[in-house]
Image: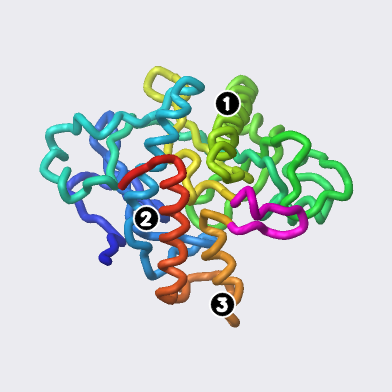
Amino acid sequence: MSVLLSTSLPFPIFRRGKVRDVYDLGSRLLIVATDRISAFDCIMPDGIPDKGRILTAVAAYWFQATEDLVPNHFRGQAHWPTEVEAYREALAGRAVVVEKTRPLPVECVVRGYLAGSGWKEYQAGRAVCGVPLPAGLQLADRLPQPIFTPATKAEEGHDENITFERMAELLGNPIADRVRELSLALYQRGAQLAAERGILLADTKFEFGLDADGQLLLIDEALTPDSSRYWLADRWAPGQNPPSLDKQFLRDYLETIPGWDKQPPAPHLPEAVIEGIRARYLDLAGRFGVQL
């Protein structure tokens, strides 16, 4: 199976992210999801077949499933601007046209369970991003209630977890309060729909931007296996990381490689790991009825 690791279209580059190539169309953006995958802020040299199409389809599902909670930047795939129509077939399933916004400089993370960097912070001080938590919690424990734990967005290197108070300094209180409220509502919607399909939404991150009229929009991606931690509900038990349908499979493999310091260049991935990631992403998409 072939993979798409990069694109070169005749439009101004807006930005190249770890996974997406974004082109400037004036008042709108063309976002192309490649088959790149990253872990520990390093882009792997090998792509995952169909990954870009899976992410695009899953994000489209969630934009539609949450549009009653908050408007989003998604403008569909039916009516593309004339200048990109010639590339529709080549980009089928992996490209979307979205409204251009001014992105807020934070990632809005919501955690319903204790895992990842949240678990490490809790072990160090019984709090996550300044949110105090009860004593005695274990890895993968369900939290008493979902918590909002923002982070700064880093173009290079690692994102940094911050407190809500620090986020309010960056954004101003009205917007900070609103994005916290929306993030928790989006998480609850995602967790509910995931639970109906036999999976737990352990944590996820959202991004928001302001359009030309100052309206707050949900942007980037939403509730995809790249931006979320999904666990198999029937395999969940506190005290251990449950089997997941996200990038954790890749992270777990990379942790076994002796001598790699989690800095570029990243190591090549064995075929079994590539196929394992693809199978998990397809499994997740299928549970939500998403077809490629």
Question: Which span of residues is magenta-colored?
Answer: 232-243
Kindly identify which residue carries mark 2.
51
Considering the image in quadrants, where does the N terminus appear?
bottom left
Between the C-alphas of marks 2 and 1, the distance is 28 Å
Q: In the drawing, does residue 84 fall left or right of residue 26? A: left
Image coords of residue 104 (percent x, y): 51, 34
Q: In the drawing, does residue 31 fall left or right of residue 222? A: left
Q: Is residue 171 visible?
A: no
**Residue under the image location 32 percent in, 49 percent down:** 53
Kindly identify which residue carries mark 3.
260
**Sequence-first tag of 2 and 1:** 2
Q: Is disc 2 surrounded by few (<14), some (14 to 19) or many (20+) residues within 10 Å?
A: many
Choose top left, top right, bottom left or bottom right for residue 290: top left
Kindly identify which residue carries mark 1.
182
User: Closer to the observer: label 2 or label 1?
Assistant: 2
**Sequence-first tag of 2 and 3:** 2
Above or below — where is 225 with respect to 85? below
Dominant SS type (magenta): loop
Q: Amino acid at mark 2?
A: Lys
Answer yes or no: do the residues labelled 2 and 3 have beta carbons within 8 Å? no
As drawn, which residue projects farthest toward the top? Answer: 213
Front residue of 65 and 134:
65
Q: Is disc 3 surrounded by few (<14), some (14 to 19) or many (20+) residues within 10 Å?
A: few
Q: Amino acid at mark 3?
A: Trp
What label does residue 47 carry, if any?
none
Magenta stretch contains residue 162: no
User: Closer to the observer: label 2 or label 3?
Assistant: 2
Answer yes or no: do the residues labelled 2 and 1 have beta carbons within 8 Å? no
Q: Secondary structure at mark 1?
A: helix
Q: Is disc 1 surrounded by few (<14), some (14 to 19) or many (20+) residues within 10 Å?
A: some
**Sequence-first tag of 3 and 1:** 1
Between the C-alphas of marks 2 and 3, the distance is 25 Å
